[in-house]
Amino acid sequence: MNQNPKFAVIGGGSWATAIAKMLCVNLPEIAWYMRNESSIDHIKNYKHNPNYLSSVEFDTTKLRLTSDINKAIAYADYLIFAIPSAFLSAELTKVLDGSLKDKVIFSAIKGIVPETFLIVGEHFNQKFDIPLENIGVITGPCHAEEVALERLSYLTIACGDAEKAKVVAKTLAGNYIKTKISDDIIGTEYAAMLKNIYAIAAGIAHGLGYGDNFQAVIMSNAIREMKKFIKKVHKMKRNINNSAYLGDLLVTGYSVFSRNRMFGNMIGKGYTVKSAMMEMSMVAEGYYAVKSAYKLNQEYKAQTPIIDAVYEILYEGKDARETFKKLTDKLD
């Protein structure tokens, strides 16, 4: 692998924009794929993404912007995918056969691919034959909006190959970004997916009028539920209290920037799923994740009363107030 590997960001949303900002601090040039041609033109002319994190100003001489995903793939050694999981399969249909071979793929996607019920790393491994040592995850309590504001944030970079994790960690690190590496690629990716479900639960509780005391109960039960679920999926030694797990859960459950909490809050206030989605300009990954997690748990059979409750409300149309009343008897 090249001693000075080239990077490409795949995606045009807020997290993709934040990652592009971080990479541009340390690299002379990156490729950046987004499907929206008008957004590309806007960035070239005005130096910022018109739709996401518009306060971030780019040095456009560092950007190879393209609406052709295969050009971005051909340019880079390391590909960072930051597309909502619900749209990943559609984007990957555009990828030329064999073009991902020998590429190192890092997922910054916090969700499950709905077509396959696989986390993103597993999807690339099973559907594109990418070896596990060439797959990694970027996770941690790190909202894109705070990266834009250059507030101190922490990222965990997980990969089966520690050297590749170190390359990405070093490339993303900066004055306001601290990075660490992990070998728990599966556990961190599942945690990143599950915390969005728990944030929806926290939002529903808030929308229903529950207070901070109950929010704390939801969060403390959620981390234990997450631990049980991940242990069933991939048993290994891990500290669930580390920032990649507990930290990411807390910020997603409490932050005003959390779109999953916002989505849940709307549901708790009586919005339908469709009306809540229409009002939000961004995707709430947890909506798709809860269906996948619920279906997966039919096999793993972990005790997941919070996931079950959110699933019943979002997919079975059960009354949120009645469902949460039952849930409160199952928590401690």
Image (cartoon, helix red, strand yellow):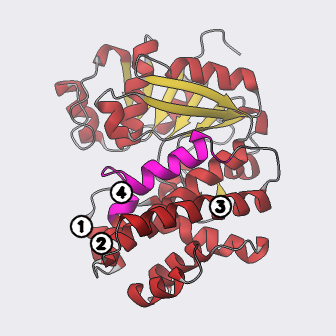
Q: Amino acid at mark 4?
A: Arg
What residue did someone put label 4 on? 259
- Magenta segment main secondary structure: helix
Mark seen at residue 102? none
Q: Secondary structure at mark 1?
A: helix
Residue 314 location (% of width, % of height): 45, 79
Query: Is residue 61 found left or right of 186 in the rendered image?
Result: left
- Residue with the mark numbered 3: 224
Q: Nearest the camera: 117 or 146?
A: 146
Front label number (3 vs 4):
3
State how far apart marks 2 and 3 are (Cα). Answer: 26 Å
N-terminal of the pair, mark 4 or mark 1, is: 4
Q: Is residue 237 above or below residue 76?
A: below
Give the mark toward the camera: 2 or 1. Answer: 2
Q: Which mark is drawn over residue 279?
A: 1
Instruction: Give the distance between the C-alpha atoms of the residues marked 3 and 4, in whole angstroms.
Output: 23 Å
What amino acid is labelled 3 in the image? Answer: Arg
Mark 3 burial class by Cα count in 10 Å: few <14, some 14-19, many 20+: some
- Tell me the element at label 3: helix
Q: CA distance from mark 4 to mark 1?
A: 11 Å
Q: Are circles 2 and 4 on residues that touch, CB within 8 Å?
A: no
Give, as a three-letter code, the residue at label 1: Glu
- Callout 2: 10 Å neighbours few (<14), some, many (20+)? many
Check disc 2 and report the residue beneath it.
266
Identify which amino acid the numbered label 2 is placed on. Met
* 49 falls in the magenta region: no
Q: Residue at x 45, y 61 (%)?
A: 199
Looking at the image, can residue 149 be seen?
yes
Q: Which badge, 1 or 3, comes first in the chain's sequence?
A: 3
